[in-house]
Amino acid sequence: MLKFLVRRLLVAIPTVFITLTIIFFALRVLPGDPALVILGENASEDALKNLRQQMGLDLPVWQQYLHYLGNILSGDFGESIASGTPVMTLIADNFLPTITLSISSIVVGCILGIPIGILSALKPNSWIDSFMRVVSFIWLSSPPFLLGILLILAFSLKLNVFPSMGSGEGFWGSLFHLILPTFTLGLILSGVMMRFARASMLEEINQDYIRTAKAKGIPNKVVIFKHALRNSLIPVITVIGIDITALISGAVITETIFSRPGLGSLAVGAIVTRDFAILQGCLILFALLVIFVNLIVDVSYSFVNPKIRPR
Amino acid sequence: MKTSKKWLNMSFALILTMVLVLAGCSSSSETSKETNSNNNSTGNNTNKVKVLKVAMPGNATRLDPAFAASAPDLTVNQTLYNGLVRFKPGTVSIDGIEGDLAESWETSDDGTVWTFKLRKGVQWHFGYGELKAADVKWTYERLLNPETGSPYLEDLKVIKEIQTPDDYTVVFHLHRPDPSFLPRLLGDDSAGAIVKKEAIEEAGKDSMVKPVGTGPFMLKEYKLNEKVVLEKNKDFFRGEPKLDGIEFITMTEQNAVDIAMEKGEIHMATGNADKLWVEKTEKKDFTIEYPDPPLNWLLHLDSTIKPLDDIRVRKAVAHAIDMERFVKEVYTPKVATLASGPLASNMEGHADLGNYKYDPELSKKLLKEAGYPNGLELPPNFVNTRSSYLNQMTFIQEQLRQVGIKMELKQADIPTYQANIRKGLNNISLYTKNFKPHAAFPANYFFHTGSIGKTNFSKYDKSDSLIEQAAQEMDPKKSKELYEELQKQIMDNYSIIPLIETKSILFRRPEVKLGYDFKGTFVYSYPIYETTDIE
């Protein structure tokens, strides 16, 4: 297992390097001049030139690239072009709200999606199955901005149960403010989970080894929960890994609707102001997050099914 | 197998714990000493803390007024700083300019020397001592230094020298007489906000987020991407503010703003100019206001490139657009009216010259005369992605198509749009800007050759001497005549097409008492003073 981890980490190094390079060049080809954004359209050419010089944007691109790599390797992500605040501080402030929202959404998605998917698979084509498939289809088709607004209208404005905005103060306040955003993303994710869990479970219960187990007289419960369930979870875990990226993009919209701080809204704000430093920092973190989550997914396979434990 | 099951259970428990811990961590990092809640501000209990919650359409990133430019920057800075002069609260007219940090002022006969007497006893936030004339001098010299890189440099270049004969007197020597000098010093738009040298230097790179002013409120907590929290300045020179604090909360989604307003989670916000939004919101228990100044929307035609270098083509464009129809269909009369000339109607020096008459037949005839009997195709133009820009430009595109002028539109976000204009990639640019209410500001910005390549989008070059003459005419009557002549010249040239004037929309909850008669605002939001209160 350790060898596997080391091997995966080594493979991650070129991936990170390529990602950093793509991020750098993608930002440099973005139209729009950060100096012009800061100084305004009335700025003289001299003022623009001065500012570009201060920001190092007047250097040849290859020099900017080397500075960028050097700074990142030494852990320096620079400072916000607009406010001068260190990017690491901004990311640290905004990382926790986003990661909390993402993880809680996954938890809700799994809790709602997997059991219902399995139940549907165990009673295929029954009214429960048909009903659940329609429900999952509705969640799957709901864009976060629509579902978020509907949840706010229902649970915040009409029923007055949850707050409609902000991230709350104190532990319970934060948890309370987290509920509606979590369900916005979690319900959508549960639709995906439900479908994958159902399909995967259906496939497993029709396998020969399940038939054999049943023929041997093993109780149905044991066959389902001990044998079929474990194997059917493997594709579901893969989906969680893939969905992390979708969750991050969903978090951008959800954070905006619920006026929560977070990496998504930080990155979007940075695009508008062409704040390269913040944008670079956010994109690098997103990339690292995806790489890390995929690693976790690979490792988790082995816990679900030891037969595929990496060597 | 048992081990795997155990691991599964443990993983699940771990994830749940992580969510709880993370929720706790994210809250603890945000926890401040605030004691307010959503409801306490609306209660009658005098022990409760009164915190006004204001929704802002973006992040306030530049609380150093030398660099503040966006609406959120200006909104927050208005409560933190003071200038030598200010608009009388709730107004934005030249007649309403009154002393702020300055108690009085006088002008030399030739209009080149302006002497200001400062209030005594004005205290800086956070114990930085008393405001002195040296602070005013340092503030303006900093803005005038090109190395500072302030966007306000161009507006203040008329200043030649600043003297401080004593601690409470500041003398400005100008290069030329300037009837618009007082508006140049207004603290309301940040350019004239006085800052403390020691505080700026101590903050270093953090000066954008560590503001120190003399205003009724001072910074308590700054969280980029979330909110700016202010607390009252008990030593404010006009008296202790009625509010205990203000929270400026970043809220970019209008639906979220509307719901939060309805729930009372915020107290005031910017509305939407859309007709449906106005009709819907007017039915609710809010106060909706349409403050001055109006934004004058102009279509700038680059008169140096083909085919727009031919005045007949420019005339054809001007007479092909029926903005009256646009106003009726898209806006309510409270929000938009037809433009009445190249300068906004609230400008000192504005002349009501009306708009170009809508006459599509005349447009077709002019095109034929110009050698385009079958119409023409303009090079592609970029349009700002904001809905107010897109709506107008797509309407104009369709109107032009009806007389045979094809124009391809490409959407670009604001930074790209600005950069493309500067590169000369737009031959027709839709643009609007909020200026201080004196004709000298837009005249120099849009119509002087010194602004070509920057903000003179039409490359208009016919009236430099008139603009310069008007800019230093101290006799108000003569000044008005000169500006009227300038506007006629611009209209006769057809390189600027005045379209519409729109007003911003603000709305607030009934419990908010502004403490002044509200007619206008220069910061795109409700100005908040020491008199503002929540009942």
Image (cartoon, rainbow, N blue to C red):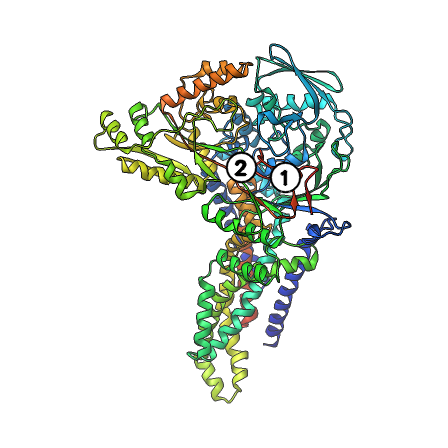
Q: Position of residue A206 (x, y in %)?
A: 43, 79
Q: Which mark is residue A184?
A: none
**Which residue appears farthest toward the top when viewing the image?**
B110
> Is the C terminus of chain A in the top left, top right, bottom left or bottom right quadrant?
bottom right
Look at discs 1 and 2 and give the one toward the viewer: 1
Q: Nearer the viewer, residue A299 or B35?
A: B35
Coordinates of residue B293 in the picture (x, y in percent): 53, 33
Q: Is residue B130 visible?
A: yes
Query: What is the x, y in percent for residue A141?
Result: 44, 62
Q: Position of residue B186 (x, y in %)?
A: 62, 26
Name the residue rendered at 61%, 42% in the picture: A87
Q: CA distance from mark 1 to mark 2?
A: 22 Å
Q: Which class describes the residues within 10 Å of circle 2: few (<14), some (14-19), or many (20+)?
A: few
Which residue is label 1 attached to? A85
In the picture provided, is B353 more to the left or to the right than B280?
left
Is B446 placed left or right of B259 in the picture?
left
Q: What's under tag 1, amino acid-wise?
A: Thr
Q: Quadrant of residue B19?
A: bottom right
* Element marked by disc 2: helix
| Res A66 label | 2
* Residue type marked 2: Leu
- Which of the marked residues, 1 or 2, is nearer the chain's N terminus? 2
- The quarter of the displayed image where residue A125 is located: bottom left
